[in-house]
Image: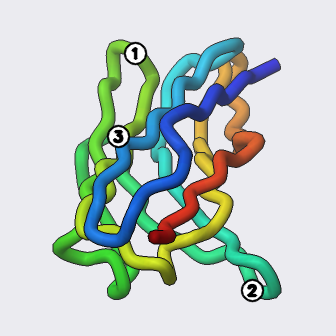
Amino acid sequence: QVQLVESGGGLVQPGGSLRLSCAASGRIFSINAMGWYRQAPGKQRELVAAITSGGSTNYADSVKGRFTISRDNAKNTVYLQMNSLKPEDTAVYYCDVYYTDSDGYEYHYWGQGTQVTVSS
């Protein structure tokens, strides 16, 4: 069993900043990659940013230069620093993790989501 605990969402004015956190715990031997997705009402879930165990990152074009993903391997935690937020960034943000358990099996797991609302 794995748990992903997300935090940091909320209401912010356009141009403001938020920092999301996602901590993974449970039967994790190693984490291969972690990331953030978002889903706005009436739209499909889309990748926002991802980071591998080696530190390689990938960003959606819409957030490049504004969002930064990072991770603390010792804490099995991934962060998403979001700056210069726009109303179109409003969505439920989901953390995901690809991990290997102690038996060598690989899994993909989703967090429960955290709401980010950008509005004046």
Please say if 26 is above or below 117: above
Q: Position of residue 83 (x, y in %)?
A: 25, 61
In the image, is 41 to the left or to the right of 85? Answer: right
In front of the other: 109 or 19: 19
Circle 2 residue:
43
Which amino acid does the dot numbered 1 rest on?
Lys
Determine if residue 107 is in view: yes
Question: Looking at numbered disc 3 in the image, what kind of residue is underneath it?
Answer: Ser
Residue matched to label 1: 75
The secondary structure type at the circle numbered 2 is loop
Nearer the observer: mark 1 or 2; the answer is 2
Earlier-in-chain disc, 1 versus 3: 3
Residue 85 placement, left or right of 77:
left
Instruction: State which quadrant residue 46 falls in.
Output: bottom right
In-image side of 60 versus 100 (left or right): left
Rendered-image quadrant of the N terminus:
top right
Label 1 vs 2, first from the N-terminus: 2
Q: Nearer the viewer, mark 3 or mark 2?
A: 2
